[in-house]
Image (cartoon, coloured by chain):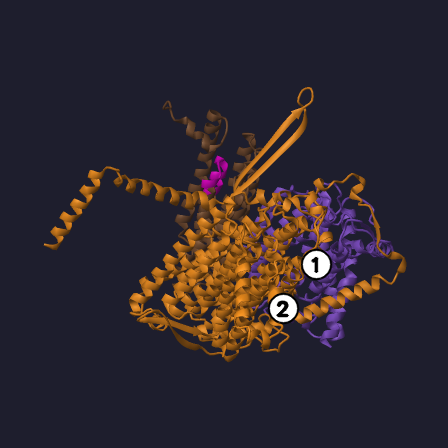
Chain colours: A purple, B brown, C orange
Amino acid sequence: MAWLIALLQTLLFIALAPLLAGWLKCCKCRLQNRRAPSLLQPYRDLRKLSHKQPVVARQASWIFTITPYIVFSATVLAASVVPLIAVDLPTAAIADVIVMVGFFALARFFQALAGMDIGTAFGGMGSSREMTIASLAEPAMLMAIFTLAMSASTTNLSVAIDHVLAGGFVLRPSYVFALLGLMLVAIAETGRIPVDNPATHLELTMIHEAMILEYSGRHLALIEWASQIKLMLYGVLIANIFFPWGIAETYSLEALGSGLLAITGKLALLAVLLALSETLLAKMRLFRVQEFLGFAYLLSLLGMLSHIILEVID
Amino acid sequence: MDIAQTSFYHQAILTLAALVVLASFVMLGQGRLLRIVFVLALQGALLALATALAAFSTDNPHFYISSAITMVLKVILIPIMLRRLVIRMNIHREVEELTNRTSILLGGASLVIFSYYVMLPIVHTSHMVTLNAIAVSLAVVLLGMLMMISHRNAVAHVAGFMSIENGLFFAAIVSTSGMPMVVELGIAFDVLVAAVLFGVFFFHIHSSIDSLDVDRLNRLNEVEK
Amino acid sequence: MALFLAYCSVVTAVMSGVLALASGQRSGLQRITAALLNAKATHLAERFPKLPGYAEFIFTKERYPSLLRQAVFVLLGTCGVFAVLGGIAIMAADGAVIDQLSYGLPWLSWHVRFDSLSGFFHCVIGIAVIAVALYGPGYVNEFEESKHPFSVLGLFTGLFVAGMLLVPLADDAFFFVIAWELMSVASYFLVTWQHERSANRRAGFIYLLMAEVGAIALILAFGVLAGFSGGLTFAAMRSAELTPLWASIAFSLALLGYGMKAGLVPIHVWLPEAHPVAPSHISALMSGVMLKVAVYGFIRFAFDLLGDMQWQWGLAVLILGTASAVLGVLYAIMQHNLKRLLAYHSVENIGIIFMGLGLSMIFASSGHPKLAVLGLLAALFHTLNHALFKSLLFLGAGAILHQTHEADIERMGGLIHRMPKTAALFLIGCVAISALPLFNGFVSEWLTFQAALQAGVLESGVLRSLVPITAAVLALTGALAAACFVKVYGVVFLGAPRSSKVSHAHEVRSRGMLAGPALLAALCFLFGIFPTPVINGLNSVAGNLLNATLPSVSAMGWLWLTPVSSDVASYSAPLVLLAALLVGTLVSWVLHRVKETANRRADLWECGFGGVTPRMQYTSSAFSMPLRRIFKTVWEVDETIVREPAGAKGQRTAVVRYQLHIGDHAWRFIYHPIAHAVTTAARHIGKIQTGNIRVYLGYSFFTLLFLLWVIS
């Protein structure tokens, strides 16, 4: 039964990710005084792309053609270990949160290789910048995870969220810092403003787009979908770890239903906040990203230190 | 004992303590003067809120008066004075380029660990729940001094000085049942006088060397090289 | 039985070395064999009529060198097989076998002890030696016999492997140091085998110098222990009672000695000089295995001989390990010589191993033996993994060097089309070393993180805050390593060739040169998917050292890895692989149902610009430029850009020349001052050599007076 719910949850994850992307676009358009496309437009885009013939450069190797599948699979695997509507997830025991970070690293490794495969300057540029930003984001992400793991004494996401739920509403300084740090890292890892502009194609400003510039057809569909799932994944992490109230603790139908409603509401709110920040802030130049991520690391470090200094009272 | 088992007010005070340290760090890494003044005001507001909460939870009405004084002085009066000063001297568009900002911030983090290590014996002496925050307040003092060392602009020096005083004030709240009223009023007025004197000095320095960069004060020595 | 296998492995290694000496003696051996066959003509020629035919076959001029080389490497391979079997046997038996050989000094025979820790390291050495033995025959064929005689290479390879196998067997200080020196000196000869190159000579000198300084530190460390125990045997040293001060002195000396051989920062400077210049299969052995023998020595000294550990030692080892890890990877990113880059990555991985050891020591000295076992497990597993993937990468680099005669990655490119099998194997090595899931590097990093996460049980608050910081630095290291290997693989194999030599390269023809790396790659994958049996084995190894084992490592069965308990953390690699394959096949099946959407090959789009040349691709220095700017204080960067203007007013640039040199700070701040101090001291002392005979007679005279006075 639990495995069925886990499978259902993963499918729901994959299915809802384009909807979140559509809602985000809708919020941004409204804020910028433009008319928004329909909420279901990302689905139509994915469908159109998957019916088109992919054009692959002659000098590309098998790495170029296999990467979209690896990226998509790794992202789906990462999505399967994060509790979306129910806390008790047997898949969370297969891979804990460090393995989830490892899945992202695997996807990014192959994405960067594919960027270099075609032998263009854009691809190399995107790969180089992406790997640099990822290296700087890793310590911050890990430190935030550590803070959580130290207070919940586990790296298994189900058990950690259970622990937070069981404590009731506790105001912990370490969680405040870890939340802020994780939000900054999420912006960097998913490639949103102010780190990277997902809607640009100017060579000086592209990072993620530069790596996938040569992709087309179903390959592009898989990669776009994977980045939408990644955005939703970070949103779910932030929402369900720090504000888990509403998530289903049993498998009854009403608990699952209210869990679904809760996560939809939380994700919608997070999307509005993201759209606000994307509209108000400008993209940073590349060599300011290290200060941004250094600040994220500092926040997570302060979170860990507040846990040790302030929260263990004897 | 874990924080989850204390009352909500204690949790809130400890969270505010952490946010005060965060404000110190933000000031440390900031290059623009108006933002430094704004964060200083924010730090003062957090302090006032923490005092009010402490007054509520420990049932000490005398803290309410401290909170009110802090609010008036540190959130309203002094920041407004500093802001007016900065705009009148037309330096609000200068941005101070901090070299190796990341190492300063990480050095600040090690100062936090160091102050925790230093305060460990004291934390064990009392049973007050909020005594853990005394390590944090020492950290705020040390970060204020680090800010005075690392920034070149004189307004940033004042902000560092003010945050040292904030740290000491916070230590008094969390570790004792409050300073005597006379001492508190005295300190508050001393801080106010210091701010006024700083303002006077800023005008002097600015008119003589036409900038507020304290590194240029080196050139005031009269010995011919 | 296990000890017999271990002895067999040492003996076969020596035999392979001795057999290699026969490589230049074809005609002499042919004459001797013919004489033997003819002298006892009545017996041998009749009993074995085919023997003269075989002898003629072997000693023909064309076949003799390659047959001899194959024989030498076959012996080396059997040596490896014996080592692996012996190691597995002793680990399964879970005991210790003691022996005494009557070589050595008259009053001190050589003591031998083969326990599970030695057995584990024999396994590690054996696997790498098997892979190198498969790879060797194809690789050494390209060296000219006259300039680089195979006899020297083969002899010293055999002695080198024998030395490495003897070190874990040693049970007294004398035997240990002899085996250690055998290992060091044999590898010196291997490093300087191509001595006509000045880089080899310089590297050999630095290597030998630092190896000997390290050996002196080791001997002093053993001397301290021997002074307190009154004997040189390890058994006596284990029971010695040391004061804390002297224990710390012995520990620091041992850390210096073993750290120098293992390659900890700042005493790592010989590694990036020596490993690139040696032949590639020797680099694989040095980097993959010799560094592990140093780790073995350190574990034996600190965990076994010293016993009672202090937390300051653990903290020092943790900090040194962290520094080595992050500095190693930062230096590696800036290199464009492939083998030098891999050598710096060895520094990084040794740092990770020492981080695990440091965590283990901290936990052991704070009274948490089970968590100490976790740290030691992570370190030992990473030792095995690093031996596997580093050897794989070096052998792959050797294949590239063999086929393209090019060592600089800035001139390579597009080799995935020319050398597809090597490219696939190298990719597995890159994925494994970047600690990505489904391969073995990830499991050992995961275990190290889990060990660091348990820091909450320590009482000291300062330690509790430092350990997560080192774990964050480890995360940074892992991400930087992944960035570096994206660069390496992307610049070497992907894209378009950047020089004509590389555009005409061919795949390696020798099957052995593919079989060796393929074996290692298969093991990398296997240990990544099924880590639990290996962890169980290591659990008992660590148990013998620390007198505690992790109770619930495989509590949920062989599919799951639960180091502390299933609530705290669990990882099931086979299920992850299954899920990944499931998702991958499902997605590709769903998407390939529409038949018109087969891939169409066309020209490169490149935003419609066209006219793309291979020179427009990202180079290695370009790829690492953002990191170079961000971390610029770590290196000594010497960058010169020269623009030649052209045109009427010089507003056009005709030529741009760019030069980049990256130096190691350790040279300028540590080694050059030391060298300067030594030469200054030597110059001052040299003043006693005046050259005047009367002065020398005066020296003898005054010494005689002094001694007479002393006697009276």
2 vs 1, front mark: 2
User: Which image quadrant is residue C438 in?
Assistant: bottom right
Q: Is residue C622 left or right of residue B190?
A: right
The residues colored magenta run: B148-161
Classify C198 as above or below C652: below
Q: Nearer the viewer, residue B181 or C505?
A: C505
Residue name at image x 63 percent, y 62 percent: C517
Secondary structure beneath label 2 = helix
What distance separates the C-alpha of mark 2 from that of mark 1?
39 Å
Q: Which mark is residue C53?
A: 2
Residue name at image x 48 percent, y 25 percent: B207
Secondary structure beneath label 1 = helix
Pointer 1 residue: C421
Mark earlier in primary sequence (2, 1): 2
Classify C89 as above or below A134: below
Question: What amino acid does circle 1 point to?
Answer: Lys
